[in-house]
Image (cartoon, helix red, strand yellow):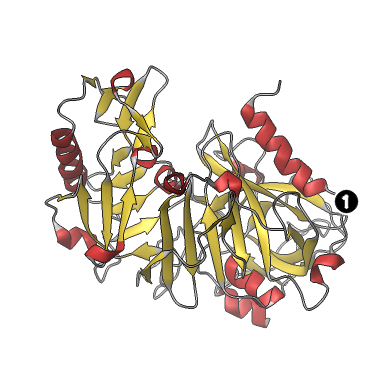
Amino acid sequence: MAPPLAVASTALLLLLFVSVSPCRAASGGGPAAVLLPVSKDDATQQYVTMFRQRTPQAPVKAVLDLAGSTLWVDCEAGYVSSSYARVPCGSKQCRLAKTNACATSCDGAPSPSCLNDTCGGFPENTVTHVSTSGNIITDVLSLPTTFRPAPGPFATAPAFLFTCGATFLTEGLAAGATGMVSLSRARFALPTQLAATFRFSRKFALCLPPAAAAGVVIFGDAPYVFQPGVDLSKSLIYTPLLVNPVSTAGVSTKGDKSTEYFVGLTGIKVNGRAVPLNTTLLAINKKGVGGTKLSTVTPYTVLETSIHKAVTDAFAAETSMIARVPAVAPFKLCYDGSKVGSTRVGPAVPTVELVLQSEATSWVVFGANSMVATKDGALCLGVVDGGVAPETSVVIGGHMMEDNLLEFDLVGSRLGFSSSLLFRQTTCNNFRLG
């Protein structure tokens, strides 16, 4: 029997190679929604997806990222396509990309990574924080329009804009990943570009899976229905998405705003009790420092040092009856896992509430998302000390988002969240569209 992770990877490949006609999905005015399947790479804790690209079409494995400016893929190693086209310097697309760069000095044979009079971009590996320069080009991109019970027709964008990265830029990514999928607010990130291509709503929903399970990204207009008949479409809690006035990208120009997703965290509760915090750290100042953002490339939630200490102290006080064990890096507060009970929503520990704007919009975090099991049997509070003066005071990491449905409404500039799907006896693995 194949191990669970191998099964998840095989499922992604099957999704990419089901024999269907891409034009079927586009009949009748185009799809209402398109999807990306998601799995978790256990070795790196990154969330990966696969899609079809190029002519002839080939599967591409990439890491999901809530930051970034465009999709980028490695164009140096084996990029073969008859349908790619350069984005000329000075073109409308190049002006909209706002890179102020133009490739003019490549003397080799023309290829996606060697073109002249071509708009230049700056792809970034947001895991390693390494950036480089690369050509901005277009090519065919195809995504499925159904998920379960079986993958269905693919919808095709004939000229999807992306940036060519270099092979070295893939270092630090999950095995086999040759790029990163940007889900940010940026003009040519997937949410806005797909909405413009297929003429559906500029929004997407993210459902991250734990290891050995499947998740999904849903672009456009689709009901959020999970087996066994759980419809979350009308029951999400919403909070405003904030704009950081200063870019948080590795390469930017003066005056650029961040395209990442920030929320207005105003407080944290443990077991219903407010944690005393320096609330000035929760606001974004004029220099772009502070605040709270969401990140899929950050495995665990990262807290500024004083916030981290306050939260761990409060959690320790509420769990004084549970046997402690030595800390397991990168965590500071760990327990004997055999002494912790279990519930439908994970380990039986106090809740952590992220208060967003008001008491009425608290994101309640249960044990499945607050605790991390280690290989030696410890169970640790899954928050990490981010240092005394980080750029962002609170970074909500992937583990805290798993098996939660998050809707990013770019038109309304708001985030919808469900809290744990486990509480409703379902998971991201049970999403159904078809």
Instruction: Tell me which residue sits at (24%, 20%) in the image.
Output: 326
Is 378 in front, or is 55? 378
Residue, disc 1: 19
What's the residue at 86%, 67% (across, down)? 23
Is residue 382 shown above or below 258? above
Which amino acid type is shown beneath numbered disc 1?
Ser
Question: In this view, which residue lies farthest toward the front?
Answer: 229
Q: Position of residue 60 (x, y in %)?
A: 72, 48
**Looking at this view, is 365 or 262 the one in front?**
365
200 lies left or right of 409: right
Q: Considering the image in quadrants, where does the N terminus appear?
A: top right
Residue 108 found in image quarter: bottom right
Query: Would residue 401 be seen by someone viewing this image from the given angle?
Result: yes
Residue 107, percent from left and from top:
77, 59
Q: Quadrant of residue 9?
A: top right
Residue at (20% x, 59% y) in the render: 281
105 with respect to 41 (left or right):
right
Residue 330 position in % (x across, y down) = 33, 31
Q: Quadrant of the C terminus?
A: bottom right
Where on the picture, by quarter, is residue 361? bottom left
Q: Is residue 373 left or right of residue 269?
A: right
Q: Secondary structure at mark 1?
A: loop
Q: Is residue 164 visible?
A: no
Asked whether 206 or 343 is in front, the reply is 343
Horizontally, residue 14 falls left or right of residue 177, namely right
Percent of width and height locating residue 283: 23, 65
Q: For label 1, count other residues whose C-alpha is less than 10 Å away and answer few (under 14), some (14-19) or many (20+).
A: few
Q: How many marks?
A: 1
